[in-house]
Amino acid sequence: MEAIFSKEIQAGLDKARVASLKRASRLRVSAGGKIHPILRMWKSGFAMEAEAPSLRGRVDLYDGSLHLMQCLIIASDDENGERRYEFKRATAVSQAPAVDFEIADDAPVGLIEDTR
């Protein structure tokens, strides 16, 4: 059984659902020096509220203050008060610099010299 609501009631329910998702999510996207909240994220994209500016291109994804990914995105569609974006590329950010050589499993982690 499916309930049918008037347009005003459905809009109010969508607005309340988006507000609840906004409060619960720590995810943020940074684009053009501005930060926008993400309502939810899945493997191939994420959703923001429909009133958010239309983004395209390179953005940075954060969970609170933790930098998660650098992404290329495109806007996919608007539905139920959400604007959905799809990843063209999503690269995880690492905390250590990339190395251009193989590190052996038994390599020493430090050098202790005899100072006698």
Image (cartoon, grey):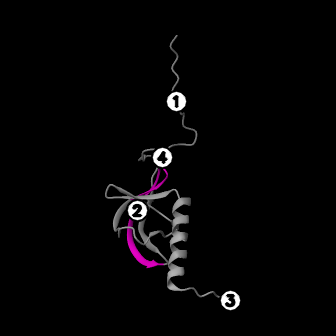
Q: Residue at x 44, y 63 (%)?
A: 90
Q: Nearer the viewer, mark 2 or mark 4?
A: 2
- Magenta span has 92? no
- Which residue type does callout 1 highlight? Gly
Do the residues under discs 2 and 1 have CB atoms within 8 angstroms?
A: no
Depth order, front residue of 106/87: 87
Whole-Å distance between the Cαs marked 3 and 1? 67 Å
Q: Residue at x 64, y 88 (%)?
A: 2
Reading the image, the residue beneath label 1 is: 110
Q: Which mark is residue 102?
A: 4
Residue 12: image location, x then y, percent: 52, 75
Q: Which residues are magenta?
A: 60-79
Mark 1 residue element = loop
Q: Main secondary structure of the magenta part?
A: strand
- Which residue type does callout 4 highlight? Glu
Do the residues under discs 4 and 1 have CB atoms within 8 angstroms?
A: no
Whole-Å distance between the Cαs marked 4 and 1? 17 Å
Whole-Å distance between the Cαs marked 2 and 1? 36 Å
Q: Give whichever of discs 4 and 1 has the lower sequence position.
A: 4
Reading the image, the residue beneath label 2 is: 71
Q: Which mark is residue 1?
A: 3
**Which of the 4 image quarters holds residue 61?**
bottom left
